Every structure is written in C-alpha cells, then in structure tokens.
Image: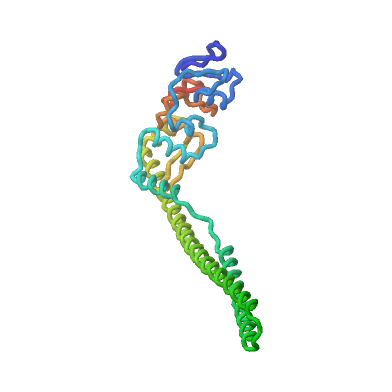
C-alpha cells in the first residue's frame, strides 16, 4: 500500500500513520475508492462491504457491521432466495391511484339530463297531440318532438357510457384495494425474511466475532435473544473489521491502538491511522 500526494510519497507499507497529515477521513476514503483527488492511495480495490466496515467510528450500527462482515466472508442465508423473490415481487407491484368520484358525478349528471329530456319529450308529445286534436298545423310540433327524441337518445347513450365508466372505475378501485393489501403482505414478508437473513448471517460468524473481540481492545458480545450486539460499539466495529475480508485498508481513528502497525496486527488487515 502506498499513499502519494502530488508525486510525494506520504507513506507506504501494510500500516501507514497519517495523523501528521491534513487529510480527513472523507478524503482518504474517497481516494481509496478511486475518486479524483490530489491524494492517491495505491491499494487493493475495496470489497463490496468495505464501505460499511472500514471506518470503525462512523456510527454504523454494530449488528449491521456484523452482518456485512458475514457477507464479506461469503456467508449466505438460507432465506436469501425467498427474500430476493419477495423484494422483486414488491418492486414490480404497482398500486394505481383510483377514485370513483369523477365517474360517479358524471353518471349522476347523465341521469339528470336523461330525466330532463324525458320530460321534454313528454311535453313535446303532448303539444303535438293537442294540435292534432284541434286540427292545427303540426309540422313545427312534430319537428320539436323529433329533435327532443333525438337528444334524449343521445343522452341515454351517454348515460350508458357513464354507467360503464363508473363500473370500470369501481372495478379498478377494488383491484387497487387488493393490490394495497397484497403490498402490505409483501412488505411484512420482506421484513420477516430480512430479519431471518440478518439472524442467520450474524449467527454464522458468532464464533469468529467472539475470537475477534478477544484480539482487539474492549468488550463486545453477540446476543441472539433478542438479536443484538452488547458492549462497546467501537470494539464491535473493530472485531467486525477483523472478521471480514475487506481487501482495502481500515481507516482507524479510534485511538485504541499504540500504532498503525499494532492496529494492522490486531485487525489482520492493512490500516491507515488517522
């Protein structure tokens, strides 16, 4: 491992102390991940789980670190396939936002218009009948009745369409309700599978974690009922880093070790002390 800034070798070896240099943890982390900075760090590429484990004092929860350490070692949970399937099904599930308010209003308006036009047709028919009985000219009354009947027919067609639209909206509301209930069931399933996976992964490295705690300063213990890590968060973080296979260096600013070399020996990994 080598740390270089603008052509100047700042440090090299399995353990490097950068406390005398003006580099923040964020700057060093970015350099390790290959960001374009003035600082260059030549080391193995970080593993997928390095981000969660490489900085022991960054506030990541101890149990999350232990699960990440198990994954970094290649451990798998028996429920991972079921979890992945449930997560995929949840992602693919869409719940449509549907309301029947608009179609209900349109149906009511269409019904009102039909009733109004029926009354208009009845009145036009009555006027026509009256003119026939008196022997008066009926041409205008017949035209009025024909026009009223035509508009009534159109309104009845529109009401049928409004009924169909409202029925369709009601069906979609039912489907959306069913989808929401299905989503809740899937969310519960995903949460349960995640808990099962976390437990299985944490327990799979319980012995390694206990041994790692013995190798670093402080005390920490994995409890299974309920599943949690008791003791010091930093101690648990250091132990999780020792359990994992991180490839890239651990960034140690905990002050728990006498030197960068002591930290590297305890953690079984390259270390940059900050």
User: Whole-percent x and y of residue 36?
Assistant: 55, 21
Nearer to the camera, 237 or 48: 48
User: Whole-percent x and y of residue 37?
Assistant: 56, 20
Residue at left offset 51%, top offset 64%: 165
Q: Name the image quarter holding the C terminus.
A: top right
Nearer to the camera, 255 or 148: 148
Nearer to the camera, 55 or 129: 129
Q: Does residue 36 appear to the left or right of 216 in the view shown?
A: right
- Pick out the residue farthest to the left: 78
Work out whether residue 115 can be spotted. no
User: Whole-percent x and y of residue 256?
Assistant: 52, 28
Q: Specify how the rendered protein is coloured.
A: rainbow
Nearer to the camera, 25 or 92: 92
Q: Is residue 164 above or below residue 22?
A: below
- Pick out the residue farthest to the bottom: 133
Residue at left offset 51%, top offset 69%: 160
Residue 102: which quarter of the image? bottom right
């Amino acid at each position: 491992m080598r740390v270089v800034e603008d052509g100047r070798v700042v440090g090299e070896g399995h353990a490097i102390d950068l406390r005398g240099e003006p580099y923040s943890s964020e700057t060093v982390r970015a350099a390790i991940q290959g960001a374009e900075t003035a600082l260059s760090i030549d080391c193995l590429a970080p593993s997928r789980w390095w981000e969660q484990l490489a900085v022991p004092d960054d506030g990541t929860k101890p149990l999350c670190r232990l699960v990440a350490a198990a994954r970094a070692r290649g451990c798998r949970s028996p429920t991972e396939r079921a979890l992945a399937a449930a997560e995929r099904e949840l992602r693919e599930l869409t719940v449509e936002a549907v309301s029947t308010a608009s179609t209900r209003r349109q149906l009511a308006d269409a019904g009102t218009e039909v009733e109004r036009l029926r009354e208009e047709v009845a009145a036009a028919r009555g006027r026509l009948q009256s003119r026939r009985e008196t022997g008066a000219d009926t041409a205008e009354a017949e035209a009025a009745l024909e026009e009223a009947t035509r508009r009534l027919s159109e309104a009845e067609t529109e009401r049928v369409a409004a009924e169909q639209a409202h029925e369709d909206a009601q069906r979609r509301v039912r489907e959306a309700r069913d989808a929401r209930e299905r989503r809740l069931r899937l969310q519960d399933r995903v949460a349960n599978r995640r808990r099962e996976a976390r437990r299985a992964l944490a327990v799979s490295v319980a012995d390694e974690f206990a041994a790692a705690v013995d190798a670093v300063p402080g005390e920490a213990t994995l409890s299974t009922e309920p599943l949690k890590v008791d003791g010091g968060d930093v101690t648990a973080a250091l132990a999780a880093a020792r359990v994992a296979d991180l490839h890239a260096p651990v960034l140690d600013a905990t002050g728990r070790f006498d030197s960068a070399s002591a930290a590297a020996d305890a953690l079984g990994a390259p270390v940059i002390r900050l």
